[in-house]
Image (cartoon, rainbow, N blue to C red):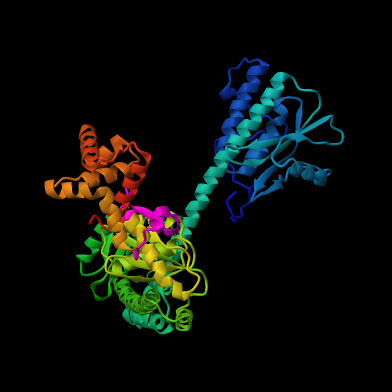
Amino acid sequence: MAGSRSHNVYGPCPDRAGSLSPDSAGRYPTDARRELRPSTTSPVDDALHELVSLSRALLEAPNEGEILRLAMHHVGAAGPYSAEAGYLEVDGDLVPSPRNGQTHAAAMDRRVRELEGQDGSVTVPGRPWGWALGLRGPERLHGYLVVTFRTRPTVAQRSQLAMLVRHTAAALSVAFAQRRRREDAVELHRVREERATLQQQLISVVAELGYQRAVHALMADIASSGGGEEAVTRALHELTGLPALVEDRFGRLKAWSGVGRPDPYPEPDPVRRNDTLHAVAQEAGPVRIKDRLIALVRPHGEILGVLALVDALSEADEHTVFALEHAAALLAMKLAHLRNLAEVELRLHRELVDDLLAGTDAASAYARSEAVGHDLHRSHYVVVVKWSNRTADDAFARTVGRAASAVGMHSLLTRRADHVVLLADDRPHARALHEALARETGTRSGTIGVSAPSDSVPDIPRRYQEAQRALEVRLNSHERYGTTFFDELGLYRILEPGADHRELETFVHEWLGQLIDYDSRHHSAMVETLSEYFDCGGNYDEAAASLAIHRSTLRYRLRRIREISGNDLANVEDRLNLQVATRVWKIVLGRSG
C-alpha cells in the first residue's frame, strides 16, 4: 500500500451488472454456471469451470476487500476446506477481514503476524488442521488466507487450493496496481492544482506590489545580509517556483534550491562545458539550453560561474527572466567581492612565502603565518611545480592551489617566472598532486620537485634549492614527467647546486672530453647517445627508440665511442665513471663543459 495514503480496503462497493458473486455456500448463480460450462460435466470439470468463473470475478472485483471476500467464499468449493479468516496488508500492517470470526481472533491474529510473510500452520480449536497461506504478488505480500481442513485433502484438492491462492494473489496485485495508479493520478492532480493555486496567488501578489519591486527588495535583503550562493538560489526558487542552481566555471555544483537535485551530480565534460559557456556568452540575456534557463555570472567580463533555472515544462515567462537576470547580477557582485578578498589573501600568502624562500627572521614569519591562519611551527616541505604547456601566471597558480586543496594539502603558495612554489605542512603523496593537476590541466606533461622536511624557518631557503634540484633532475631524466623527492635522489644529492664546478668540469673533461670535442667538430651526438644508453639501463631497443635512431646506428655509435674515448664499456670502472660523467654533464653542467 502506498506510503501514508489511507484507504478502506473493505469498504462497500455497489453491485455492478454482470458481476459474479457466490451465495453463502460458496456457489455461483445457476445461470452463470450454465453459461460457462456444458450441460453435462464431471466433478473435475465443475471445479475447473468454477475456478475460471472465480478468476474472472476476482479480476473484475472493485477492490481488494471484495477480492478477499470472493476467495473466502469459494474456498469450500476447492475441497474439504473452510475459510476461517482473511487478512490484507495495509501500510505495513495486516488488517483482518470483517468476515473473520471473533472467538479466536486475537490468537489467530498474533500467529499470522508471527509468520512474517511465510506460510505456516495455525491452530484453530475444533479443527484437525489449519494453515495460513500467504497471498504474494511479484514484489510484496498482499495478505493471508487462513484455511482449515475437515479431512486430509487429496492431491487434486491441494492443487485446486493452491490455484485459488495464486489467482487471488494475482487479482490483488492487479487491484493494488490499479489503485496506485488512481491514487497517483489524484495526487498529481492535487499537486498541480495546489501549484496552480500558489502560482495564481503569487501572480496576485506581484500584481499588487509589482514584481520588479519584489525582486529588487529580495535581492537587496540578500546583499545587505551578506548571503551567498545558497541565499541567491533560495530567493530565486521562491520567486519563480522553479529549481535554481549555481555551478562554478567548470560545471561543478555549488548550490541548489528546489526539488529534483541529481545525486550524484553529473561530472562535467570540459569540452561540452566550454561550448555551453561560449553559446550563452554570445547572447545578451539568459539562454535556454535543453531544460535549463542559463545566465552567466560574469563581473567585468570574466566568467565566474553559471546561475540557472530548471524549466522542463517551459513555464518561464518575462517575470522569470527578469528575476534570473537580477539574481545573476547580484551573484556576480558577490563573487567578485569574494574574488578580491581571495586575491588579497593570496597576495599576503605570496609575500610571506617569498620572504621565507629568500630568508627572513623566524619571529616575524611565525607572526605573519598566524595572521593568515597557517601553522608554521610544523615541519614543512617545499614543493616546486612546473607544467610544460602552462606559464606560471596567476591562473596556473590558482589551478595548483585548487589541486593541492583537493588532495588535502595545507599549504602557502607563490609563483616564480616558470614554476609555482608550495610550502606544505606535510609530505605530499608520491602521485596524488600530479594526478590532480593532470585532471585540472588536461595533460600529464608536468614535473614536481619536493624537498626534504624543514624543521625551522632559516632552513627553508636551502629546502627550496633542494626542491628545485629534484625538479631539475626529473626534467633531465628519462621519464621527465612526475614527482621526484630530494631525499630519494641518491647520487644527485651530492651533485647539488653550489658544488665546485671546476672539479666537476675536470672530471667530465677527463672522461668525456674527447667525445665532447668530437661532437663539436662533427656536429654529432656521441655524448647524448652515451647518456641515453645509460639512462635506458643499457637496453639497445629502448635507447634506440629514445634517440629515434635504428638499432644498428646505435651499435655503430657505441663502437665509435669506444674508439674515440679509448674507454671500454664492458669494464666496470670505466662504465661507472662514464655514467657518472654523463649525468654530471647533463644535469649539473647543463650539457656544457
In this rendered view, identify the residue nearer to me: 264 or 325. Answer: 264
Can residue 102 be seen at all in this image of the molecule? no
Percent position of residue 444, x then y:
32, 52
Instruction: Work out which residue is located at the far left of the displayed protein and give it.
Output: 522
Work out whether residue 187 or residue 267 is closer to the camera in this orientation and state it.
Answer: 267
Q: Is residue 588 visible?
A: yes
The stretch in magenta equals 474-499
Residue 288 falls left or right of residue 163: left
Residue 21: give x, y in percent of width and height: 63, 35
Q: Quadrant of the C terminus?
A: bottom left
Q: Quadrant of residue 452?
A: bottom left
Above or below residue 45? Residue 464 is below
State the residue lying farthest toward the right.
126
Q: Give the x, y percent position of residue 371.
A: 46, 82
Task: Please tell me which residue is depicted at 43% across the width and 56% down the height of the picture.
Answer: 432
Which quadrant holds residue 309?
bottom left
Counting labels gives: 0
The residue located at (25%, 48%) in the rendering is 512
Q: Position of residue 420 (x, y in %)?
A: 33, 66
Q: In the rendered view, tell whether residue 433 sits above or below residue 132.
A: below
Residue in the foreground of this view, choosing between 383 and 112: 383
Residue at coordinates 60% horizontally, 37% vertically from top-left? 137
